[in-house]
Image (spheres, rainbow, N blue to C red):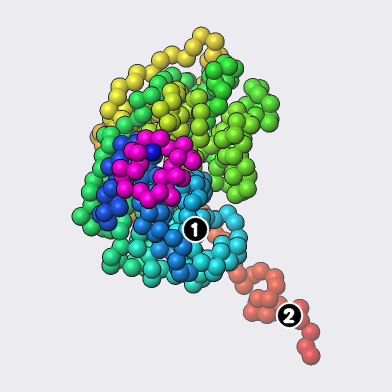
């Protein structure tokens, strides 16, 4: 407790830290809390699971002190509902010995109850950008008294397309005498540009190099020939008793559903698997997360919606069924295990088409982790023809990205190249088979056999005035179906 006392927190917050089990401040808390209490703007970069939430929550609670007025004085923006709910839970625990009113705003639920709570008076808002703007436009949120703004996981908000909404929010809330903070585990260039827009002379705190995985997480990478082999490997590992509480990350919701069905069909009981993705209802997502947190289910299959900032204790393993295409998400994914100084393991399956992306991730995390063959007990399936073609096509596209002169096995036909060379952009937009455009015109620079022109011509649609119905009266000699009155 003396350590938190040294940071300048009031007795109520010191008691709360003791009540929730905080013993010693983490490095990010030790550096950020004094600066925020002094009124400075802060740019905080630290590994996931190092206590960033409390690093900005404690100073906000300290400076707001007690319930006052009807309009919120602090706003915390986060990219996902799950993260908003978690931040709200942390702040409620730290504010348990104060009378501060804290409200979480997120979509998936009707806004009626949230508006009623806002009307009763709120001190601190934790919200997704979309729901905040929705209620602001309904004139349910007043912003004139906002003095503190925090952006949590700003890089993920930008990846999810929230940048226009964030800029709208920044335009609507007061900027004079407002204290700002930005906290994230990674700090790409686009986030740095955003920080220049709304932070004033910020103090940059970088506890660990950005995009560095936690040292207590052991990382393993295995080569997998195809999707079915990945599923076989998944079944192999989940049969081991040490895989007690496992998060499986997939690239899309369709793959999430496929993995869930395979696990239920061949590996484990249906009551031990839950799924989270954007198509799941809010209550379903909340219940799945809560059951996994309490240890009632063993496996949680999810997209990257659950990769950021979600604090679930005692996750033994993280399995990357797919390599993330947003490379920084790899750090966030494996950060779900090895939290609070506990050890954890991450396993990543890589196909031929994903090897390119894995090398990019190695550059970001500044580690070289060579893929290993799958264990002997894993059944290696033959790759279906179409899946093989898709992977080879992806490899070609990746090599073209690095070398524009590379042709590869999947290259454009000659008539497309000629059309491009002639600069006929209008024709290229509508090119079909054999160089025929949808309008029937021949692309510039493409030679065609005149004998085939008639055969391949686009059929002419029916004449409007030759159809029966209301246009019949315009046809010569055609009697109207309507009776004269």
Q: Height in image: 219 above or below 273?
A: above
Q: How many marks?
A: 2
- Position of 93 with respect to 423 (left or right) is right
Quarter of the rendering occupied by the N terminus: top left
Quarter of the rendering occupied by the C terminus: bottom right
Q: Are marks 2 and 1 in contact (CB under 8 Å)?
A: no
Percent of width and height locating residue 48? 38, 36
Q: Which residue is mark 1?
A: 99
Q: Nearer the viewer, residue 3 or 220?
A: 3
Residue 1 got which mark? none
Percent of width and height locating residue 164? 38, 59
Could one spot residue 351 in this view of the protein? no
Residue at the image position 48 percent from the left and 40 percent from the top: 20
Q: Nearer the viewer, residue 381 or 481?
A: 381
Q: Which residue is mark 2?
A: 480
Mark 2 packing: few (<14 Cα in 10 Å), some, or many (20+)? some
Residue at the image position 68 percent from the left and 31 percent from the top: 271
Asked which secondary structure carries label 2, the reply is: loop
Percent of width and height locating residue 91? 46, 49
Residue at the image position 62 percent from the left and 72 percent from the top: 465
């Amino acid at each position: 407790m003396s350590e938190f006392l040294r940071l300048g927190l009031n007795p109520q917050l010191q008691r709360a830290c003791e009540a929730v089990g905080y013993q010693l401040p983490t490095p990010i808390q030790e550096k950020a809390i004094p600066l925020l209490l002094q009124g400075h703007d802060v740019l905080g970069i630290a590994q996931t699971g190092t206590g960033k939430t409390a690093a900005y929550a404690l100073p906000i609670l300290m400076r707001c002190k007690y319930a006052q007025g009807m309009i919120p004085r602090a706003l915390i923006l986060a990219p996902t509902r799950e993260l908003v709910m978690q931040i709200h839970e942390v702040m409620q625990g730290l504010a348990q010995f104060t009378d501060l009113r804290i409200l979480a705003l997120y979509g998936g639920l009707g806004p009626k109850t949230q508006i009623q709570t806002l009307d009763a008076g709120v001190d601190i808002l934790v919200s997704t950008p979309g729901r905040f703007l929705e209620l602001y436009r309904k004139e349910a949120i007043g912003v004139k008294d906002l003095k503190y703004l925090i952006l949590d996981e700003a890089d993920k908000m930008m990846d999810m397309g929230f940048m226009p909404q964030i800029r709208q929010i920044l335009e609507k809330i007061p900027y004079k005498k407002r204290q700002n903070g930005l906290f994230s585990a990674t700090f790409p260039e686009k986030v740095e540009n955003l920080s220049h827009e709304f932070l004033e002379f910020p103090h940059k705190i970088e506890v660990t190099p950005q995009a560095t995985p936690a040292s207590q997480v052991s990382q393993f990478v295995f080569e997998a020939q195809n999707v079915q082999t990945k599923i076989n490997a998944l079944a192999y590992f989940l049969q081991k008793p040490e895989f007690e509480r496992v998060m499986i990350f997939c690239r899309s919701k369709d793959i999430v559903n496929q993995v869930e069905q395979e696990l239920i069909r061949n590996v484990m009981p249906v009551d031990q698997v839950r799924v989270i993705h954007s198509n799941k209802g809010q209550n379903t997502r909340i219940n799945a997360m809560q059951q996994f947190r309490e240890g009632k289910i063993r496996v949680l299959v999810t997209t990257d919606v659950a990769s950021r900032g979600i604090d679930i204790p005692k996750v033994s393993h993280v399995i990357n069924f797919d390599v993330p295409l947003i490379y920084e998400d790899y750090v966030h994914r494996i950060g779900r295990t090895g939290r609070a100084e506990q050890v954890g393991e991450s396993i990543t399956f890589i196909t031929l088409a994903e090897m390119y992306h894995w090398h990019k991730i190695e550059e970001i995390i500044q580690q070289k982790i060579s893929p290993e063959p799958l264990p002997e007990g894993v059944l290696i399936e033959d790759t279906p023809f179409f899946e093989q073609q898709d992977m080879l096509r992806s490899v070609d596209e990746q090599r073209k990205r690095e070398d524009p002169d590379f042709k590869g096995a999947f290259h454009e036909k000659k008539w497309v190249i000629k059309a491009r060379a002639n600069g006929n952009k209008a024709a290229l937009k509508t090119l079909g088979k054999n160089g025929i455009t949808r309008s029937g015109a021949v692309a510039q620079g493409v030679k065609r056999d005149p004998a085939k022109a008639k055969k391949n011509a686009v059929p002419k649609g029916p004449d409007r005035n030759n159809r029966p119905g209301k246009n019949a009266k315009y046809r010569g000699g055609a009697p109207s179906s309507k009776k004269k009155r």
